[in-house]
Image (cartoon, rainbow, N blue to C red):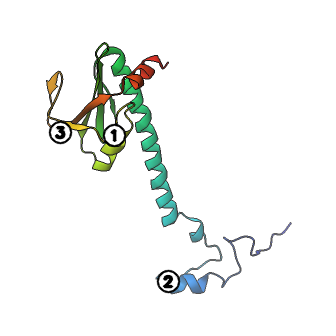
């Protein structure tokens, strides 16, 4: 069976279809009837990839923040996770019947908008109530560390403790 080149095959069109447009915009003239340039990723594809990567990072951060907070609430020690450009630590301490203290520590360079995303996802904490700290409860901050603290809602702390 012989296949003829038709307009339903966008990568293979009769000679002369792509050449005028392509040759007008490029130094090297098109020398074949097959042109796949339109099928390659363009700026829209690169933008979509960046947006998808950003959405994945926010989803991963939200899950990690919740897991670190829950782990710290169980044992009262700081729990940490490594990300490509920074290290994230969370410390949650609860006192029987009193307020629950939450602290977030970031080591490394992180943009301000990413810090806001992290602080917004700490369960039971008002995203606007975080206060920058110069030390953690058990130690001073090390170089390249940033820390914030606030109070956690006791009901949210109880829900975290009851999660499996």
In the depicted structure, whether residue 86 falls above or below residue 54:
above
In the depicted structure, whether residue 95 falls above or below residue 140:
above
Identify which residue, 71 or 87, lies in the foreground: 71
Question: In this rendering, which labeled residue sits more in front, label 2 or label 1?
Answer: 1
Q: Which residue is mark 1?
A: 127
Q: Which residue is mark 2?
A: 25
Report how far apart the C-alphas of labels 2 and 3 lie in the structure.
49 Å
Q: Residue at x 65, y 77 (%)?
A: 33
Identify which residue, 87 or 19, lies in the foreground: 87
For the N terminus, the image quarter is bottom right
Q: Which class describes the residues within 10 Å of circle 2: few (<14), some (14-19), or many (20+)? A: few
Disc 3, SS = loop
- Is residue 88 visible in the rendered image? The answer is yes
Q: Earlier in the sequence, mark 3 or mark 1?
A: 1
Q: Position of residue 29 (x, y in %)?
A: 53, 82
Q: Earlier in the sequence, mark 2 or mark 1?
A: 2
Question: In this rendering, which labeled residue sits more in front, label 3 or label 1?
Answer: 1
Q: Position of residue 131 (x, y in %)?
A: 22, 37
What is the number of the mark on residue 27? none
Q: Residue at x 36, y 16 (%)?
A: 74
Q: Which residue is mark 3?
A: 144
Q: Residue at x 57, y 84 (%)?
A: 21
Disc 2, SS = helix
Disc 1, SS = loop
Q: Residue at x 48, y 81 (%)?
A: 26
Q: Position of residue 62 (x, y in %)?
A: 42, 36
In the depicted structure, whether residue 33 falls above or below residue 84:
below
């Amino acid at each position: 069976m012989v296949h003829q080149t038709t307009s339903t095959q966008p990568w293979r069109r009769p000679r002369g279809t792509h050449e005028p447009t392509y040759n007008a915009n490029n130094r090297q003239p098109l020398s074949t009837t097959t042109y796949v340039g339109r099928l390659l990723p363009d700026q829209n594809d690169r933008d979509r990839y960046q947006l998808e990567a950003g959405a994945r990072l926010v989803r991963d951060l939200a899950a990690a923040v919740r897991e670190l907070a829950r782990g710290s609430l169980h044992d009262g020690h700081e729990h940490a996770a490594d990300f490509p450009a920074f290290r994230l630590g969370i410390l949650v301490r609860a006192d029987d019947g009193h307020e629950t203290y939450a602290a977030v520590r970031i080591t490394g360079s992180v943009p301000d908008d990413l810090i806001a995303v992290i602080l917004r996802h700490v369960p039971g904490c008002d995203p606007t109530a975080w206060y920058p700290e110069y030390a953690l409860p058990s130690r001073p901050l090390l170089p390249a560390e940033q820390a914030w603290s606030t109070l956690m809602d006791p009901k949210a702390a109880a829900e975290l403790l009851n999660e499996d």
